[in-house]
Image: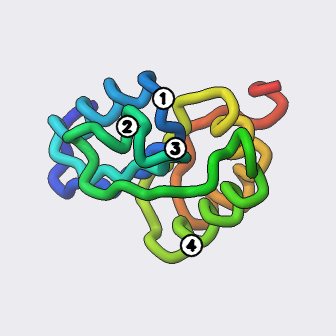
Amino acid sequence: MAKQNKPLKILILDDGRQALPFLRSFKRAGHNVAIACGSKLSTGYCSRYPDKRLSWPDYFKDPEGFTAKMFDYIKTCRPDVTVAVGDVGAGIVARNKVELQKFTAVAVPDLETFD
């Protein structure tokens, strides 16, 4: 990602190891990064790269709670970009993409493509 004049506020959903290269790349490009994790013991939560660590309901155990928390955060904090790097989080975002795009750019395919 090319360095922007103004740092972006980026929200990364999913806290598996696959989030780490995203965290590192976005931080090195000078962006402000928040990560939403289902556990404070997750790899993403423990990483040195996030500016903000969010402990949300685990999307495997409580997808409705995760979705509600995601909407609350996005409507309140208005990240410039929301990125879901895992299948479950990406599915939740894809199902809610139309509504989410009113508040943030979403880096997931449309639901038909995702399915």
Q: Is residue 8 above or below residue 91?
A: below
Label 4: which residue? 75
Label 3: which residue? 13
Farthest residue, direction bottom: 76
Q: Viewed as shown, does residue 33 lie left or right of 39?
A: left
Q: Residues within 10 Å of mark 4 (few under 14, many from 20)?
A: some
> What is the C-alpha distance between the residues marked 1 and 4?
24 Å
- Nearer to me, 4 or 63: 63
- Marks 1/4 in contact by CB < 8 Å: the verdict is no
- Marks 1/2 in contact by CB < 8 Å: the verdict is yes
Q: Amino acid at mark 3?
A: Leu
Of labels 1 and 4, earlier in sequence is 1
Residue in the picture at 52% in, 52% down:
105
- Marks 3/1 in contact by CB < 8 Å: the verdict is no
Q: Position of residue 42 (x, y in %)?
A: 43, 37
Label 2: which residue? 44
Q: Position of residue 68 (x, y in %)?
A: 70, 65
Q: Amino acid at mark 2?
A: Gly
Residue in the picture at 66% in, 27% down:
87
Q: Residue 16 got which mark?
A: 1
Of labels 3 and 4, earlier in sequence is 3
